[in-house]
Amino acid sequence: MQRSHLVLTRCLGLVLVVMLACSAVAVQPQEAIGAAPAASVKKTGKPTAQKKPQAKATVAKEPAKPAAISKTAPAASSPATPRKAVRKAPRQDIKAAITMDMSRKRVLYQQNADKPIAPASLTKILSMFVILDEVEARRASLDSIVTVSHKAAATGGSCMNIYAGERVRLRDLLRGMAVASGNDASVAAAQHIAGSEDRFVQMMNRKAKQIGMKNSVFKNVHGLPAKGQQTTARDMLTLTTRYLAAHPHALEDYHSRRYLDFHGYTPNTNPLLGLMAGVDGLKTGYVGASGYNLITTAKRGDTRLVNVLLGAPNKSVRLQEASRMVQNGFETAEALAAKDAAAAAARAKAGKKGGKKKEPAPAAKRTVTATGKPVPHASLSRQTLP
């Protein structure tokens, strides 16, 4: 009896153990469904902490950031990638522009270069050209004393603040025209040179035709609004290059001066003077019909640039785009100069070996593509101005 009781007890214990084992198996899949550690244990054979899946989830999202960085990082490290301020496409918020490497007589960039636009105070460059021609011909002197007329003193717009009856040297009037963009100085100087403003305007238009300004007409000596008065970016480039060739001292004597000390301190209206390396001129302008104009001259090394920008909507855009043109211009000029030097070296090497190599087309007729530096356009035409 006791023996049968013992057997029965053992059987009941075995049944209990089996039931407990089945219960554990039934519970285990439910835990595995809601917890990631079980999967981790199966793969690695090691227990995994509860926080591990969170770390993996964070790491899985991280590649999105490096992907974004990988697009911009080369721009900072690669010299061939354009800077943010450098744009290849023409800007739609300026009306016209043109850039020339004056040292090599090569046009580097142009946008609506023949579009008629009011010249505004860029007119004063032509006025100064005519005056300095008269001085060079000894029909006038920079030390001549000019008596300011009532008409000159009453001229509106930007002025150097001369008053009627005041006696001013012609040299000082030229500085007032270049630095302060003085409309009053322009009228006073024109009256002194030609006897009247109208006769001086005739001299200006003759000079414009003589130097090849084909699409320009001038109605006054200072650029204030006048019906029919117009120019183009290309004509202004022609004017600037001929002006500097005829009177190279004009930059140092007038246009590169940072301020005018005459009846008080007047800063130069050119916003790039002292802001960008190499910039040494030349002239600003504004009337409502044109917008904000600026001709910039700059020199770095053996490269002399002339940039003409016409019709910016405000001073901020004018400054931004003019500085971009200067930077692009030097980079493009350097790239093309390096390409020319490499081509010349290759020709010289071929000549020494006695081999015959096909000569490239003349510079004025072929299209050059700059490489290695960012350029405004992929294809740049070499052109020579009159």
Image (cartoon, helix red, strand yellow):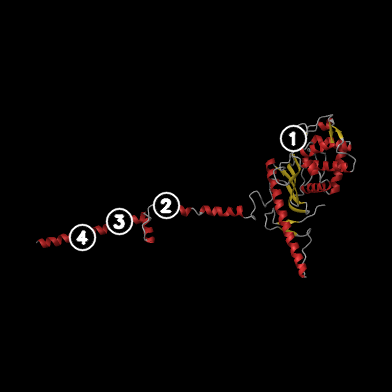
- Residue at coordinates 23% horizontally, 58% vertically from top-left? 19
Instruction: Examine the image and state in which quarter residue 313 appears.
Output: top right
The numbered mark at residue 334 is none
Q: Answer with mark 2 or mark 3, whichever residue precedes in sequence.
A: 3
Which comes before the other along the chain, label 1 or label 3? 3
The residue pinned by badge 2 equals 54
Per the model, the C-alpha gap separating discs 3 and 4 is 19 Å
CA distance for labels 4 and 2: 42 Å
> Nearest the camera: 173 or 100?
173
Chain-order first, disc 4 or disc 1 = 4
- Mark 4 vs 2, N-terminal side: 4
Q: CA distance from mark 1 to mark 2?
A: 66 Å
Helix, strand or loop status at disc 1: strand
Question: Which residue in the structure is indicated by mark 4?
Answer: 15
User: Disc 3 or 4, which lies upstream in sequence?
Assistant: 4
Q: Is residue 334 visible?
A: yes
Please name the residue that numbered disc 1 is placed on.
266
Q: Amino acid at mark 1?
A: Thr
Q: Secondary structure at mark 3?
A: helix
Indicate the amino acid at tag 3: Val
Which x, y percent locates residue 221? 82, 39
Give the residue drawn at x 36%, y 59%.
46
Give the label on residue 27, or none: 3
Q: Which amino acid is tagged 2?
A: Gln
Q: Nearer the viewer, mark 4 or mark 1?
A: 1
Q: Nearer the viewer, residue 55 or 367?
A: 55
> Where residue 55 sits: x, y (%)?
43, 52
Q: Quadrant of the N terminus?
A: bottom left
325 lies left or right of 66: right
Q: Residue at x 74, y 35 (%)?
A: 266
Is residue 160 found left or right of 69 in the rendered image?
right
